[in-house]
Image (cartoon, helix red, strand yellow):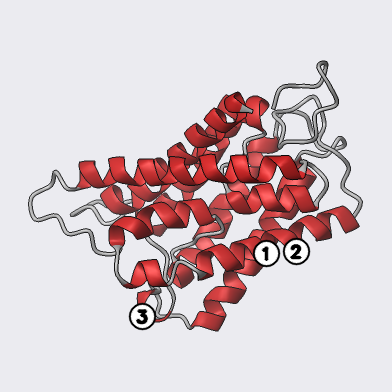
């Protein structure tokens, strides 16, 4: 479990540092920013790269909602939930701290939203609480269906991280104007702590909605008949079968 937690810590830290870092440092860089599309791609690439790098160790969740959804889907035991979630949140917070240290090195730096998520006045497009709730629930549910489908035995071997990374990219392309895209409570927690103020008060939504969406997605994937993860691809965690089971 210590190795698994270390892998989840590293993967979630990279997701937060790379994804939120692209938003804070590069999205609107004077004269040549990467924009929404670049930020969306950055988030997808962080998951893709770390799923290959440490997915075989921990399953490559990097997200408390994914861990919960995979438990609902029958992929992980309940004993994984708290250790994984703790490692993920700590990784995201420390990554946000590093990002803040780097960003504050620029003259005239102001934290502003610091890539945090929000609704109402804090939504990039001023979307309502209900609109943001629905977006996060639906996006997270579909994300779980993709994860469980991409790692099922009949899915093409070795391509799961690509499908999952592209799914996260698509979700960000759609949801950045609405909520700044969470679908990940750990990713939301780190930046919110440094953005402060109302962003912290609104953080509840970005735990509640992704977790609810993950439960829905895990149940839906299981109802569709998704089997346990295949052993021939970087795995999204399943229950170990004993000493001979793949390390995850």
Query: Which is more toward the observer, 215 or 103?
Result: 215
242 vs 35, left or right, is: right
Query: How far is the residue under mark 2 from the one under mark 3?
Result: 28 Å
User: Mark 3 falls on what kind of element?
Assistant: helix
User: Mark 2 falls on what kind of element?
Assistant: helix
210 vs 116, left or right, is: right
- Whether residues under marks 2 and 3 lie with C-beta atoms below 8 angstroms apart, the answer is no
Query: How far is the residue under mark 1 from the one under mark 3?
Result: 23 Å
Query: How far is the residue under mark 2 from the one under mark 1?
Result: 5 Å
140 vs 74, left or right, is: left
Residue 224 visible in the snapshot: yes
Say which residue appears at 85% left-offset and 38% top-offset.
Answer: 228
Q: Position of residue 188 (x, y in %)?
A: 45, 57
Say which residue appears at 25% left-offset and 47% top-offset.
Answer: 100
Which numbered marker is on residue 8? none
Q: Position of residue 121 (x, y in %)?
A: 36, 80
Q: Position of residue 40 (x, y in %)?
A: 47, 52
For the N terminus, the quadrant is top right
Query: Which is more toward the observer, 136 or 31?
Result: 136
Residue 115 visible in the snapshot: no
Mark 2 = which residue? Answer: 216
Query: Which is more toward the observer, 243 or 121?
Result: 243
- The part of the image, by quadrant, that contains residue 110 is bottom left
196 vs 54, left or right, is: left
- Whether residues under marks 2 and 1 lie with C-beta atoms below 8 angstroms apart, the answer is yes
Mark 3 = which residue? Answer: 121
Which numbered marker is on residue 213? 1
């Amino acid at each position: 479990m210590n190795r698994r937690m270390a892998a989840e810590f590293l993967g979630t830290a990279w997701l937060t540092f790379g994804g939120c870092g692209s938003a804070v440092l590069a999205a609107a860089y004077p004269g040549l920013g990467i924009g929404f599309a670049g930020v969306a791609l950055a988030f997808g690439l962080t998951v893709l790269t770390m799923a290959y790098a440490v997915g075989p160790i921990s399953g490559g969740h990097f997200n408390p909602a994914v861990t919960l959804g995979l438990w609902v889907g029958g992929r992980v035991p309940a004993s994984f939930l708290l250790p994984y979630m703790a490692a993920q949140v700590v990784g995201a917070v420390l990554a946000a701290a590093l990002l803040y240290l780097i960003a504050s090195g620029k003259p005239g730096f102001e934290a502003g939203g610091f890539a945090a998520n929000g609704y109402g006045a804090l939504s990039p497009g001023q979307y309502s609480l209900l609109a943001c709730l629905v977006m996060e629930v639906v996006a997270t549910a579909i994300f779980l269906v993709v994860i469980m489908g991409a790692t099922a035995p009949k899915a093409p071997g070795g391509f799961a991280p690509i499908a999952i990374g592209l799914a996260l990219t698509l979700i960000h392309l759609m949801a950045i104007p609405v909520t700044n895209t969470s679908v990940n409570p750990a990713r939301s927690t780190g930046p919110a702590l440094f953005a402060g103020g109302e962003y912290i008060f609104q953080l509840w939504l970005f735990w509640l909605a992704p977790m609810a969406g993950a439960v829905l997605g895990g149940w839906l994937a299981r109802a569709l008949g998704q089997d346990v993860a295949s052993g021939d691809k970087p795995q999204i965690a399943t229950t170990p079968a004993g000493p001979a089971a793949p390390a995850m």
